[in-house]
Every structure is written in C-alpha cells, then in structure tokens.
Image (cartoon, grey):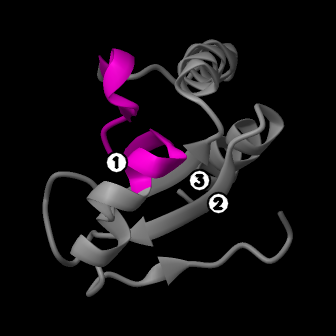
Amino acid sequence: MEKTLETYLKTLLKRKAFDVITIDISKITSIADYFIICSATSNRQAESIVSQLISDLKDNKIKPLTIEKGGESGWHLIDYGEVIIHIFYKPVREFYNLEGLWADAPMVEYPNL
C-alpha cells in the first residue's frame, strides 16, 4: 500500500495540488484506509486536477470506484476503495475542516516527496 500511496501523492503534486496530507483512518472506520486531502487555488484548477489525476492513475492501472465532481461546490471526491481523495478549492477546505473532523486519526508523513 505504501507504494500506491506514493503514486497518488506524486500524481497530485505533479498536477499542482498543494497542502497535500494523508490521514490513516483504517483504525477508526471501515469506509477506507486513507484519506488524501489537498487544495487547489480555484474551482477550475480543482476540476482540472480531478480530470488529470483520474487519467494519470488509469495509465498506472489504478481505476476509481466512484467519482463525485463537486462542480461549483469546490469539493471533489474520488474513491479508490482503500484510498479516498478529497480535492478542495482552498476556502471550501477551510470551511469543512476534514482534518479537524478526523483529528483522532494519525497523519502519514512522506519526507521524500
């Protein structure tokens, strides 16, 4: 799983997502093992990151189970089963504060990225 997480993270960073964090939720819930949360500077950039991420990961034979494009809401979700990726327009991320809601879950550190 560690290698797969790195693939997600590198792809998001390549597509100019920022403030990328990974939360290990595996001991708290059964919906997934990890949340990856990131920001974009605009809703248009968030939509672009979603489209490019899906395409790049398909090239690596990683296909999503569900895609929830948030449109003007600024919150996009891509469910890969063990990993759920949340891509936010920055002000929307601050409003919903998923990091705060999942504060009991440990953050996963990637010093080499």
Please name the residue shown 22% across and 78% down the image: 27
Figure check: 32 above or below 110:
above
Residue located 46% across and 49% down the image: 91
Q: Residue 5 carries which label?
A: 3
Secondary structure at badge 3 equals: helix
Mark 2 vs mark 3, foreground winner is 2
> Gap between marks 3 and 1, in whole Å?
10 Å
Residue 78 appears in the picture as rendered: yes
Mark 2 vs mark 1, foreground winner is 2
> Is 8 positioned to the left or the right of 1 in the image?
right
Q: Is residue 72 above or below residue 90?
A: above
Q: Marks 2 and 3, how far apart in space?
A: 16 Å
Over which residues does the magenta segment extend?
67-93
Q: Mark 1 points at which residue?
A: 82
Q: Which of 85 and 46 is in front in this view?
A: 46
Spatial CA distance of label 2 from label 1 is 21 Å
Please name the amino acid that badge 3 sits on.
Answer: Leu
Q: Is 28 placed above or below 64 here?
A: below
